[in-house]
Amino acid sequence: MKTLSLRSLLLCFALLSISWVQAQELTQTIRGRILDRESQTPLVGATVVVLDTNPPQAATTDADGYFKLTKVAVGRHTLKISFIGYEEQTIPELLLGSGKELVLNVGLAEAYTSLGDVRVVAEREKGTARNEMATVSARSISVEESKRYAASISDPARTAQTLAGVVASGDDLGNEIVVRGNSPRGLLWRIEGVEVPNPNHFSAEGASGGAVSVLSSNVLSNSDFFTGAFPAEYGNALSGVFDVRLRSGNNEKREYAFQAGVLGVDFAVEGPLRQGGKGSYLANYRYSSLALLKDIGIDVTGGGGVPKYQDLSFKLSMPGRHGTLVLWGVGGLSTSNSHAVTDTTLWKRYYDRFESVSGSDMGVAGLTYTYPLSEQAYLETSLSASASRQTFQSNAFETEGRVKDADQKFVSTALRASVLYNHKLSSRHTVRAGFIASRLGFDARSGFRDDNYGGQFVQFLDQRGTANTWQGYGQWKYRATEQLTISSGLHTLYFALNGHSAVEPRVGARWAFSPTKAFSAGLGLHSRHEAPFIYYTRIPLGEGAYSEPNKNLDLARAAHVVLGYDQLLREDLRLRVEPYFQHLYRVGISPNPNSAMSALNYGGGTATDSLVARGRGRNYGLDVTLEKFFTGQYYYQVTGSLYDSRYRAADGQWRGTRYNGHYVLNVLGGREFKVGRQRNNLIGLNLRLLWAGGNRYTPVDLEKSREAGYQINAQGQEWAEQGPSYSRLDVRLSYRKNNPRASHIISLDVQNATNHLNLYGRFYDRYSEQVETAYQTGLLPFLNYRVEF
């Protein structure tokens, strides 16, 4: 790496930081809407107070629940929202810049009891999930957190990796999420309440992550992340749920945002559909390339060409007299390639002779109509269409010339229709029910040279088809007392391709036995089907014949049990402890009685084996979070997990899974400094220290590998070896300059600031005939400039 690169970036950052000065007091508008959290009806006459202005500024909501606070000084502010008969809510340390209005949509929960003008106050905790049915293992992730945390680079998936119970999948360049020792394939992604394909660039088929999110922070709202025992409306998920929400655009004023950095350029625009109306539009386009990283001496491409990606997101919100119509969409394209070393005298590794081209695309669009049936009930209908495509072709240079090594294409489509009915019966009872119908399509081709078949090219998959799924659910939230809330429900999933189904009861409870302490619990059954093409995997029988043994593969299933303890140690400091146990069953494994293969170890890619639903797994552990909220211009967060993740395959032995790291510790913290003549500019310093169990791998049988000429793993030692502890320090330095008509933000994120090389894995290299060690990425700097106006 060129030493000039990082020094140059730091020098540019310093010069820009000291060159801007502030000479006048700047103000901006805070506005939004206050709704009943359960029924989504507007609250008329709710009070919104900015606590830290002198004197305090206040506003009340109009007949449609809207409020507006003008000429609020830029900087951080705390809002208190109250309404008679509802629980008061405080939103601390909101960042107000000069370039964009701050627009909020806040849901208040009705108090358990109210007498006349006496308000029962029970302030909602920071990070509480948006979904009111959630009681345990759920957290809301804010857009500001994804921007603030060191090396998160505004990626919601990387932000989720800092939560208790969550681990990165073992690749510094990826954002794939491992929840409580489960395979990342068990994660459900939703956008605007709709199941969607993996929304990440450079993803592999079947994976739930990639190199960077397709979702830009410019279009995101606060989103919910679940690590277990999730409510009944979430189906087709084994381990966790990422429920992403897109924000609506500004419906009164046109605003823009532009940013540029080593990852490319990003442009957003929003505004009213028509002046004086309530409708709005929001759109964001991003084009990125890693060419700048290569130019400063950092190669993250493996010696190949420059990976490129682009994405587009939009949302049109059209409120009307009889409901709200929303049109939204998200899509991304990404390509990457690597070049072979054609001079045979320069070959140092076996894979120097390979060239490859890969692509990863996804897109989804949806239309949602929310119709208020009454002041206490609404009906939400949704139609969506999605598609994803992963392609990979590689060739090897051999003595006989260029030889095809792999040729894969996976195209998946989905048409979905859903209906959700929500009825708030009273302050104590809320019911919700829904139905989801999905038409899944696929066009899959997968073939590669397989050493198990003498190095011949084998076409494991070549199939087109469709499959239908049907889901139904019902939920009931019951506030038994002012302190005790119970949420129960039932979810059903039917997979029409082979007729398998699951009935999944779920229940959760939260008991706030004191104003600052609470116990919670959740348990339930969950299931998930594989991608449809898995069921059409072909196994060679010889002489051109194939079998399709996976047609009748059952749904994989899991039973979750979670306990929780929450304590507010002080107003801005919270402790959360969650022990959990998960029993996984009907997991796909090889029918070979000597095999240790299990789908619980799959990341991305397709199966090349026969599968039967006889596998087992178990995950148990303890998650701990100590979080100091952003108050007094600083915050810190410590999350730790101790866990064990095991599986049993056809050979009957219990083993640690591929994702059994045993422990992970995240320590995050940050401080803001007010600068400038009026002290309304901000310098931010954020740090993240990550320490976790090292990657697991299967040891290589060196002698057998040399004899065979390709890698042969040690039999009976699947995933038995673990690398040294993983450690990484990330740093973020930022400067926000507020001008009268714009905000300028320059930031430098440095991932792995100490350049510590963590082990990725060990493999047999046919060229050197040795077991080689692969390491993960070293220091990665991301310099970025952003302007909001």
Image (cartoon, rainbow, N blue to C red):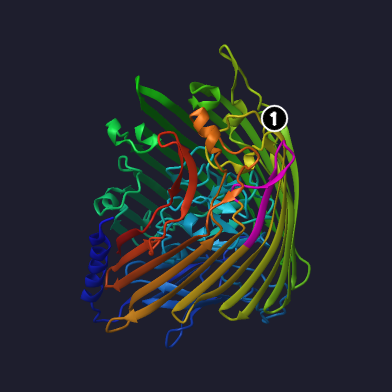
Q: Position of residue 606 (x, y in %)?
A: 55, 33
**Rendered-image quadrant of the N terminus:** bottom left
Q: How many marks?
A: 1
Q: Position of residue 554 (x, y in %)?
A: 70, 34
Query: Can the viewer see residue 37 in this picture?
Result: no
Tell me which residue sits at (41%, 37%) in the image: 768
Q: Which residues are magenta?
A: 642-659
Q: Is residue 362 left or right of residue 561?
A: left
Q: Is residue 553 magenta?
A: no
Tell me which residue sits at (34%, 49%) in the image: 286
In the rendered image, the vertical position of residue 668 relative to residue 431, given as above or below: below
Query: Can the viewer see residue 311 in this picture?
Result: yes
On the image, which quarter does residue 664 sit in?
A: bottom right
Residue type pointed to by label 1: Asn
Q: Is residue 69 left or right of residue 578?
A: left
Question: Looking at this rendering, what residue extends furthest in the top direction?
Answer: 543
Q: Is residue 446 left or right of residue 263?
A: right
Q: Position of residue 309 (x, y in %)?
A: 35, 44
Q: Residues within 10 Å of mark 1 (few under 14, many from 20)?
A: some
Tell me which residue sits at (46%, 67%) in the image: 688
Viewer-closest of 52 and 711:
711
**SS for callout 1:** loop
On the image, which quarter does residue 650 sit in?
A: top right
Which residue has dot 1 on it? 592
Tell me which residue sits at (38%, 23%) in the image: 403
